[in-house]
Amino acid sequence: MCGLLFHLFSDQPSSLSSYEAALELMAERGPDFQDIQIEEGFAAGHTRLAIIDLDQEANQPFWDEERRRVIVFNGEIYNYRRLRREMEEQGIRFVTASDTEVLMKALITFGELEALRKIRGMFAFVLHDTRTGETLAVRDHFGQKPLYFSQSDNGTVFASDPYAITKISGICEPDLDSYGLYLATSGETGTRGLHAPDRSFFKGVEMLPAGHVLRIRPGKKLEKTRYFAPWDLFDENRYLQNLKRPKSDLIQELSQLVQQSIRRHLVSDVPSGVFLSGGIDSSSVFWHAIDQNPDIQTFTKISPGIERIPLEVVPELLRRRPATAHFIRQDKNRFVPELEEFIEYSRAPSRWNSGPSMNSLCKSARDNGVITLLGGDCVDEYFGGYIHYKGYFENDPPLNDLGDLVRLGDGRHSEIAVDYLKKQNAIRSEILSCLESVVSGAELMAQATMLHDTTTFLQSCTLPHSDAYSMMASVELRNPMLDLDLVSFAINLPSDLRSAHHENGEFGKLLFREWAGSTIGEFTNIKKEGTRNYAMYMADSGFWNQDEFSIFKLFDLNELPHPRDLIRYINLELFHNAFFMGKEKRTIDGLLSAEGRAALSSG
């Protein structure tokens, strides 16, 4: 939706030009309106992508009628109309039709924790009370919207973009610990590298974890507390009841929850569209979205030579549910320059190498007047959809095994991952203590693993990745499959209804597959491809002058890496080159060999 900036300074504000520079870095996040307000003790800035209530009265920074409280907010509150009605019944008056005003007044009316319990949406916001001097920063339950912060002698800065913070602090240095953690994985499981949920790749700039509140009171230390974790949704009684319920009842409830979530996520005052890959998740979103909005448009990428589902399934879906459809062809010779652009925008090595291709869909949506997009991400984590779960669970690992969350390499950087491992082990312990009075054995392992992925993998990989590629195109991506009520339902199902085989032999999301097959058609129940991209095509050691890589001067790296390790080297090199090389910044051609230039040239 937007980009936010908030500086709570202890001495003097930064220069107006530095605040403006920070906002300019978030211009794509909010092309419709930008403003910076410097007040006594703080500065609040915002870049707006107008989606709900397009009137200028809904612009931010947004003040209450008393001009006591001010909020900067990035995201959407999908159930804002219901919350508004509830408050109006209590005599609360509203001056706009925006969800921003509803969010602010919900926090005041219901109190912080009750408001966060009632809200259904994605959000990152900073609320400041000028009377008490208290500042409250909050990130949504799963981490759909980013919120970075940094502390210095002159206060605390919050922003939607870590690089924007460096314009206020004046310090822009690499976080070598984050580099080391990113490089700590290896081989087949290490393509993406590790991204810590609570830090960035810029030294001194942290990420507020999902489900957390950060509070600053005058004269007191900063307080960071957790208000939500996915295992909070586990309910012993509900789980035990679901063990006895007929599968048909559960499928009916799942259907109702999916449709409710899609209805919520279609709330918008601007045109909407849907990613349509032909996979079971996006197909399900499309199938029900077009029932509720016949004008919905679809966006499908075509990657010649490496994927088949879009051309096999999408035409059949569109035959059964006609819609305005857009097919965007990917070019493998454009992958490297597009990856470079994407890494520079996302301010991190790419978490998932599909960023360039997904960004091309978002650009197409924007070009066709579509401002909000619905995607099918996030089902695999809590419904057990990843194929690696199959072999992992069959091997009967110990309960504290973290699986693909942490798969360290040959030891070069593993010492940097010790803190990360400790934090992940602490999370696993909390999850096990929540579950072990009800489930045990293989069931406990499966439940714990899916909860752990929902907790850590979503906020460190899937969600920041999709936020970056959509915001880069000034388009808002929404995740109806991450609705709190839907996730709560799935988490309380036994694992044999999630991470199990469908009758056609396909693994994972069993109940979801059966529902989709009966609703849409069994033609959607085909082998998962995932989001195909050309990363492996570029991962040829002969294509790159690795002796020109600056990261080889920072770390002892294998000069003949596994192709998946090379993908991470390239990602990290492109990131470091973009932000920290200054006058020594290399061009892509300077990093490529003659063979690489010939193979990867964009023509």
Image (spheres, rainbow, N blue to C red):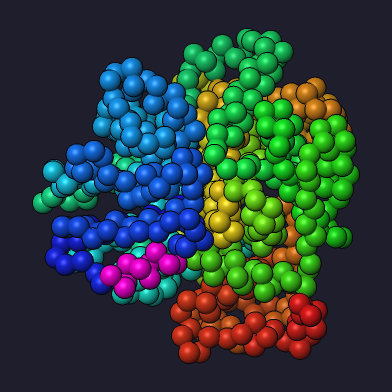
Q: Is residue 358 left or right of residue 553?
A: right
Residue 434 seen from this side: no
Q: Is residue 261 left or right of residue 420?
A: right
Q: Is residue 490 left or right of residue 104?
A: right
> Quarter of the image holding residue 603?
bottom right
In the image, is residue 438 part of the stretch drawn in magenta? no
Q: Is residue 293 left or right of residue 46?
A: right
Q: Residue 552: x, y in percent?
A: 55, 81
In the rendered image of this protein, does residue 56 appear above or below residue 180? above
71 or 520: nearer the viewer: 71
The residue shown at (72%, 43%) is 297
172 or 472: nearer the viewer: 472
Q: Residue 168: x, y in percent?
A: 31, 69
Per the rendered image, the range of residues in magenta is: 16-25
Q: Residue 123: x, y in percent?
A: 43, 43
Residue 474 seen from this side: yes
The residue shown at (58%, 83%) is 549
- By secondary structure, the bulk of the magenta-drawn segment is best described as helix
View extreme (left): residue: 219
410 or 236: nearer the viewer: 236
The residue shown at (59%, 66%) is 342
The residue shown at (55%, 34%) is 267
Q: Residue 597: x, y in percent?
A: 75, 84
In the rendered image of this protein, does residue 221 appear above or below residue 66? below
**Total label count?**
0
In the rendered image of this protein, does residue 270 appear above or below residue 254? below
> Quarter of the image holding residue 132?
top left
